[in-house]
Amino acid sequence: MKKLVNDPNQVVIEMMEGMLEAHPEQLKRIPGTTVLARKDAPVQGKVGLVSGGGSGHEPAHAGYVGKGMLDAAVCGEVFTSPTPDQVYEAIKAVDSGKGVLLIIKNYTGDIMNFEMAAEMAEAEGIQVAKVVVNDDVAVEDSTYTTGRRGIAGTVLVHKIAGAMADSGASLAEVEAVANKVIANVRSMGMALTPCTIPAAGKPGFHLGENEMEIGMGIHGEPGIEKSEIQSADSVAETLTNKVLEDLKLESNDQVVLMVNGLGGTPVMELYIVNRKVAQLLKEKSIHVHETLVGNYMTSLEMAGCSVTILKLDQQLQELFDAKAEAIAYKK
Amino acid sequence: MKKLVNDPNQVVIEMMEGMLEAHPEQLKRIPGTTVLARKDAPVQGKVGLVSGGGSGHEPAHAGYVGKGMLDAAVCGEVFTSPTPDQVYEAIKAVDSGKGVLLIIKNYTGDIMNFEMAAEMAEAEGIQVAKVVVNDDVAVEDSTYTTGRRGIAGTVLVHKIAGAMADSGASLAEVEAVANKVIANVRSMGMALTPCTIPAAGKPGFHLGENEMEIGMGIHGEPGIEKSEIQSADSVAETLTNKVLEDLKLESNDQVVLMVNGLGGTPVMELYIVNRKVAQLLKEKSIHVHETLVGNYMTSLEMAGCSVTILKLDQQLQELFDAKAEAIAYKK
C-alpha cells in the first residue's frame, strides 16, 4: 500500500487535525467528536447546514464548510457512515434556533444514521429537515444503496442550499431549494483504477491492465459494465449521454457542468474530458453557465472521473452565483 | 497506460481546448499558439506576467492565469520546454507598454527558450525582465538543470509578483519582489509512484512496491535517496527539516506553508502530512500565516507531495494577502 499515512486506523482523526492546523480561522472541531464546523458556528439567524458521510472523498465534505456553504461536516471512518451520535453533535453545534438541514448522500447507512440523529435532535426541540441526494444515474440500487447513489452533485446542493441559508431563508425554504437542486442534478462516473482503504491495505476491487468500469460508484460499487479502456471522447460521450437522457434538457437550457476527478486523475485529463462534454452540450444548444473542473468528490486515489449536470432556473442560477468562502470552494 | 486521453500526441492542445471551454470568460488562446492568456490581455497600465513550461503540472501554469496572478501561460509539450517562438507570442500578447516579467522554473531548456524569446521581444522594443525560480533544496544540478530545480514555490512567485503588478508597480519593482520571493522560498518533494507521459506510454522510472524516493523532481528526476516507504510523519519531518535547514528561520518568523500534492495523492494524505509539518513549525515558534493544501504543481498522476515554505516580511505578506482571481487560485 503506497500511502502517506501513519497508523492506518487513525487516518480520519489525523486528517482532521491537519485540516484544523491548515485552516484555524475557518474551522473548529466540536470537542470529542469527528465534526468539523465553521469557527463561528452557530451562526445567528441562519439555518444550519450539516453534511458528511464516510471519509475518503475529500475535499468532500469538510472542504465545503464555510460561509455560503456548510456549517458542519461529520467525518465518518473511511467509506463508512458516521454514527448517529456524531451527526447529532453536529446538529447541536450549528443550530442557532432556526433549524438545521441535513444533506445526505443516498447510502443506506448514511440515511439510517442521519435519521436517527435527526430524531435525537428533534427530541431536544431542534427543528431538523433532511434531503437525500441521489444524482448518480448509473444504476438503481447498489451495494450500499436502495435507489440511486449520491455522488458529486452533492457539492452543488451544498453550494445552492448554502446560499439560500445565507440569505436568511427559513428551514422549509432551504429544504425546498435543496430538493429543487436534487430534482435537477444528475451525474455519472467511471473508474480506471481501484483505490485502497488504508485500514484494509489492499484495493477494494480489481480492474485489469486495459480495463475500465463505467458507472462505478465512489466506494468502488459496481457500475454498468467493464470494458477495454476507451478514449477520453468516448468516455465523455457515454457519461454525458446517460446524464442527458435522464435530465431531459431542451435547447437553450442553462446548466452548471462539473467534470470531477476521483483523486488520481491528472487535471490535464479532466480538461480533455471537458473538451468533449462541452462540444456535446453545444451541439444540443445547451448553454453552460459555469464549468467546474477538478477534484470535488473523490474516492481516495482512484483514477477516473464523473460528469455532473445541473439544470438551472433563475433562482438556482442566482444562488449558484452567490459568494461562497469554503476552504475548497471559493466564489 | 491508464489515461483519459484521445491521441497521446494531442493531449496539450486538447487540454487547452478543454480549459477554454471551461473558462471562456477568463481565458483566451493567442491564435495559432499554445499560449493561454487573460481574456482582457494586454491589461493597460500593468506589467505583464508570463510563465509556463512543460505541461503535465496542472493547474500550473494556465490555472494561475487571471487577475492578480499571471497574464499568460505558455503550454509546452508534456514535460518539455515551450519553444522560444511560443514564449515570444505570449510576451507580445500581454505587453501593454509597461514591460513583461518572465517567471521561469530553473530547467536548462526553459531558461534557454525563455531567454531567446526575451531577446526576440526586446529586439521589437518590448521591455522584458526574467526571474528564475530555484526553490527545490533536494539537489544541486539535476537531469535537466544546472543549480536547483524550480518546483511548487513558483506558484507563490506568481501570486506575489502578480499582486505587485496589479498594484501598478514598474517592471523593475515587480522583478525585485519576484526575486525577493525566490530568495525566501524553499521546497522539497518526494514520490511514492512514477508517472507516465502519454506519448511515452510507460512510466518514466521505477519505484518498487515498498519503495519511495525523497527529493524527486517534478519530472521524475532523481532525488536524494530511495528507501522503504516511511510514515507520513517521517516524510513530513525529512522534507520540513531539509527546507528549514536551508531557509534559516528564526522564532516568530511568519511563513506561508504549502503542502502540495503531485497529482495522485489523496487530499486526506496531504492533510495528514500537514498535521506533522504544522507541529514541527510550532515547536520552532514559527508562525504560519496561511497554509495551502492541495494539488498546485503536479506531475501528472504521480503519488507524492512537496513541502514549500516562504518566509514573509510585511511587503510579501500584504501582497500574498491581496485579491487573486485565477482559475485555480482564488483569494
Image (cartoon, coloured by chain):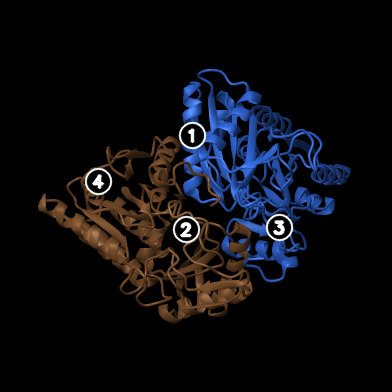
Chain colours: A brown, B blue
Identify which residue, B183 or B117, lies in the foreground.
B183
Of the two numbered discs 1 and 2 in the rendering, the one whose residue sits closer to the viewer: 1
Q: Could you tell me which residue is drawn at 54 percent across and 35 percent down? A: B234
Tell me whether marks 2 and 3 sit on the same chain: no
Identify which residue, B131 or A38, lies in the foreground.
A38
For the residue marked with disc 4, what is the amino acid?
Answer: Val
Task: Provide the secondary structure element on which disc 1 rests.
Answer: helix
The answer for how far apart the CA atoms under marks 4 and 3 are is: 48 Å
Task: Provide the secondary structure element on which disc 3 rests.
Answer: loop
Of the two numbered discs 4 and 3 in the rendering, the one whose residue sits closer to the viewer: 3
Which chain does the numbered disc 2 sit on? A
Tell me whether marks 1 and 2 sit on the same chain: no
For the residue marked with disc 2, what is the amino acid?
Answer: Thr
Of the two numbered discs 1 and 4 in the rendering, the one whose residue sits closer to the viewer: 1
Which chain does the numbered disc 4 sit on? A
Check disc 2 and report the residue beneath it.
Answer: A298
Check disc 3 and report the residue beneath it.
Answer: B203
Q: How crowded is mark 3: few (under 14 residues within 10 Å), some or many (20 or more)?
A: some
The image shows residue A118 at horizontal and vertical percentages of 19, 56
The answer for how far apart the CA atoms under marks 1 and 3 are is: 30 Å
Residue A94, numbered circle: 4
Which chain does the numbered disc 3 sit on? B
For the residue marked with disc 1, what is the amino acid?
Answer: Lys
Residue B276, numbered circle: 1
Q: In this view, does B41 lie to the left or right of A81?
A: right
